[in-house]
Every structure is written in C-alpha cells, then in structure tokens.
Image (cartoon, rainbow, N blue to C red):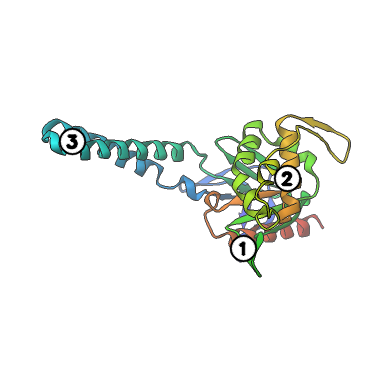
Amino acid sequence: MCALSKASGCLAVGILDDDIVMGAGLVELDGIYIKAHAKRNGFTLCLVGICGVVLSSLWLTFLPEVMQLAGFFLTCASLVAILIGWFKVREPVHSFSLHRDRLSYVNRFGGWQLDWDNIQRVDVPRILQGLEQKPLELVGIRVKHYEPLLDCISLRLASNILMQQRALLLQADSEQCQTGRCYSANLLEQDRYKSASGKRYTGMKAMFAHRMARMREVLGYDLFVYQSDLDRPAEDFVRLLRECQQQTVLNQD
C-alpha cells in the first residue's frame, strides 16, 4: 500500500508491494490515481440522449408534419449525445497512476509507463508568438531514454498519438515555416529507427520515436499530456509529478 502525503499530495515513505487494504468501503491502492476530465458525465450524456430519442419519437408520432423538422433535429442531437457519452464511458476510470517507481498512462487505445529515473524534465511547454512566450494547455515530458518507452507502448496508442499531435506540430512549426509548404513534409515520419543502444524498430514504433525526436526539436519535450487527460490544471499536475519524482529519489537515497 502507498500512503499519501497530505502536505504535498505525493507518495510517502512506507510502501508495500501492490497491497490492497479494504476498510469502511474504501479501497486504497499503491499509488495516486488521476481521473481524466474527458471521462466525466458519460452516463449523463447517454441518459440525456436516450430521453431525447424518446421525446423525439413522441414528437414525430403525434405532432403535425409542419413541426416534424424540429423532431428530426432533436433526434440527431440525441444520437450525437449518446455517441459522445458512449465514448466517454469506454474510457478507463483513471488516465494516470503515479506509483513509487513509475508513472503510468492508459486510455482506450492502450498505455505506456515511464520509470521516474527515466524522466529528465516535466513542465508546461511554451511557443513563441510574436515577442511573447505563450504557455500551452498541456504538460510536456522529456524522456532520457526512448527504448523502455518504445518497448511498452501499444501500437494503437502510438498511432493515435501520431494523429493527435498533428495540430500541435503544425502550431509549433508555424513560426519556422514561412512558405506554408513545409507542413505536409513535417507530418511524415520514417518507419525505421535505431535506438542509442543499437536496437532497431520498424513500423509504427519507429515513426513514434521519430515524432518524439521532432517534438523535442520544436518544443523541447517528447511526450505530451493534454488537459482533457487530467483532473486539475496543467501547472498543478507538473508540480505533483515533480514532487513525486523528488520523493522517489529521496527514498532511494
């Protein structure tokens, strides 16, 4: 079991191996668990959508034809609400788990994990807009060694990250691309990669490794955590990760 420090919200000393203690209806696990903002209100949206479908069915059945157009719009809106709610419900309960030795992330596409000693830096990335540094609404993680991350990340998640980061990459490159013709080239990644230790990767993981290197060049970080994956502001999550990493180092000493 991992006790939580009330002062810092981080992992405290005195950890047992993945024990689960149950008492008074409360389950305490080995770590701190973060619930994604995108997970919220999933069942509520599904319920609202179902009620909307029932109401639109009654609308189309009993009201005159001149008013049926509004009923069709209500039906479409209700189906969209059900679909969005279903995707929210499908997301895992917790997006992040902070353990004594690692940081783990998971969504419906898969997951990855990083040991604390493999994290070089955590901060809120900034981009240059004119003469000002504008903070982005996400958290950047700079990794020391790519190989452990490439070995554990799922192919579906790597593919999803490549798609998700397109807008971020274009935004970061906007100051460097004056002609407007370099965007399409920057979105293409090589499908072969050789790690620092000599291990070779092909396919999606190789493309993901090259993308991390590209993002490091333009933003200074390899992995990015979006605000929708968190239950708190990005600055607070950065502070939590730093405290946990520091506490882990102190415990090892």
Whether pointer 1 and pointer 2 mark residues with C-beta atoms closer than 8 Å, the reply is no
Rendered-image quadrant of the C terminus: bottom right
**Label 1 is placed on what type of residue?**
Pro
Percent across and percent down for residue 1 are: 63, 48
Q: Classify residue 179 as left or right of residue 26.
A: right
C-beta proximity under 8 Å, tags 3 and 1: no
Q: Which of the two labelled residues, at mark 2 and mark 3, occupies the earlier sequence position? A: 3
Q: Position of residue 121 (x, y in %)?
A: 74, 57
Query: Residue shown at 88%/35% (left/top)?
Result: 198
User: Looking at this rendering, what residue extends furthest in the front direction?
Assistant: 179
Residue drawn where x is 62% and y is 54% of the image: 3
Q: Secondary structure at mark 3?
A: helix
Residue 4, picture quadrant: bottom right
Label 2, label 3: how far apart the Cα atoms are: 52 Å
Residue on which the image places disc 1: 135
Q: For the residue carrying disc 3, how many other residues have a C-alpha within 10 Å: few (<14), some (14-19), or many (20+)?
A: some
**Residue assigned mark 2:** 212
Residue 114, given in percent of the width and then of the height, sits at 72, 45
Of the two numbered discs 2 and 3 in the rendering, the one whose residue sits closer to the viewer: 3
Residue 81 appears left or right of 61:
right
Residue picked out by circle 3: 68
- Marks 3, 1: nearer the viewer: 3
Between 208 and 244, the one lying in front of the other is 208
Question: Which residue is nearer to you in this view: 209 or 228?
Answer: 209
| Residue 151 to residue 4: above or below | above
Q: Looking at the picture, tell me which residue is in the foreground, 134 or 117.
A: 134
- The residue closer to the viewer here, 88 or 104, is 88
N-term mark: 3 or 1:
3
- Kindly identify the amino acid type of the residue bearing the numbered disc 2: Met
Q: Secondary structure at mark 2?
A: helix
Three-letter amino acid code at disc 3? Gln
